[in-house]
Image (cartoon, helix red, strand yellow):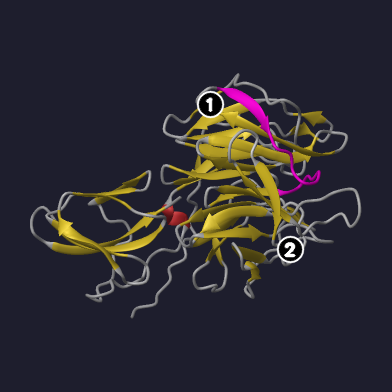
Amino acid sequence: MIGLLTLVLMQVWEPCAPMPTPGYGFACAAVGSRVYAIGGLLSDTAPRLAVEAYDVPADSWITGLASPPGASSYAGCAELDGKIYVIGGWDGHSELARVDRYDPAANTWDTVAPLPWPRWGLAGCDCGGEIYAIGGYSSNVLGYKRTVARFTPDSGAGRWEVVESLYTPRTSPAATIAAGRMCAVGGLYFGALPSFESYTPGAGWYQYKRTMRVARSGAAAVGWGKWLCAIGGQNSHGPLSSVEVVDVDSGSSWLNAAALPTPRVFCGAAVVDGFVVTLGGSDGQGAVAAVEKADSTLFPLSGIEEPEAGVLLQSTPTWATVASGHVRMTCRSAVIYDGSGRRVFAGTGPVDIRLAPGVYFARVSDTDGRLTSGRVTVVR
């Protein structure tokens, strides 16, 4: 097998329409083709009360959306079933247990069951139809937290239950799904952390031996198939522009990816329509309005062989498109394998199949009957 791993070092971040209301420490989640920036701070003493949405295909912002029930910064945030949950946070005076839910389709807010404890500087993540509130900080006993709670929507206000704690206490970690696992990345525990953990329900958290090249708290994180991507953040040297990726399946070493044009901490990030979108944050002097996006060239995806034929794959096949989990191929016939080499599809084209997030390998006969092969990445 050819094991080459190509690391993209070129500038791949493309500037986009800037935030109408710059801020940091805001709640951030994607619904459909839009990324929402909710609340946060304009400065260390001024709350950002705006709710705004960046439309990725249109490269434009939607403003004037319904405000949440109260101010909140450094909250956890997660999307579930097309609704955005803003979890805990800081209202300028104290940490919150409140959990507010936004419905973008109706542009309305409601409030669901509160956290088991007030908390700010926590991460939120949706996993398996439930939402997790991870780590954080409380001004009462011990400060830095390992505790994790899980929200089940049920009917009405839903319910929270405390589940397995993190291996390491983490304030201001990032959280996302990569390779089907929920991951908590970096954070603060008497200093910025370089470590990350993944969670399996019922089995708890596993802390990987391979740490990030740069310790970081207040970073953003996204998953792209098997790749976990840590973006920005800060450590003792100040806000960071560096971006790192790791293959969660193999737990191999972290790799540097193309750096952000602007150092930033407490920014937002999401994967939308095949792009990693990063928005806002603080550069240490104040709020940043900049928004950038990067495509799959951010990730080291080349150099893996097709399972049966041993042919080096094209990095970006022209005959395949991916949208909302659907893989479409213009071809006479196709065979598709998952990352373990298991065949998941074989048939005639054209192909339109829905696949779970991950990296897939395809061998096709194109419309002219020529044999070719390539990699297809389906992101969450």
Disc with the residue nearer the chain's start (1 vs 2):
1
- Residue lying at 25% horizontally and 76% vertically, measured from the top left: 310
Vertical arrangement, residue 53 with respect to residue 194, above or below: above
Helix, strand or loop at disc 2? loop
Q: Amino acid at mark 2?
A: Leu
Q: Which mark is residue 234?
A: none
Q: Which residue is mark 1?
A: 61
Helix, strand or loop: magenta stretch:
loop
Q: Position of residue 80 (x, y in %)?
A: 54, 41
Q: Residue furthest right?
A: 141
Left or right placement of residue 25 versus residue 312 in this view: right
- Residue lying at 78% horizontally and 44% vertically, measured from the top left: 120
- Residue lying at 55% horizontally and 34% vertically, measured from the top left: 83
Helix, strand or loop at disc 1? strand
Q: Which residue range is magenta in the image?
A: 107-122
Is residue 109 highlighted in magenta? yes
Q: Which mark is residue 193?
A: 2
Q: Position of residue 153 (x, y in %)?
A: 59, 41
Q: Position of residue 255 (x, y in %)?
A: 55, 67
Q: Position of residue 313 (x, y in %)?
A: 29, 67
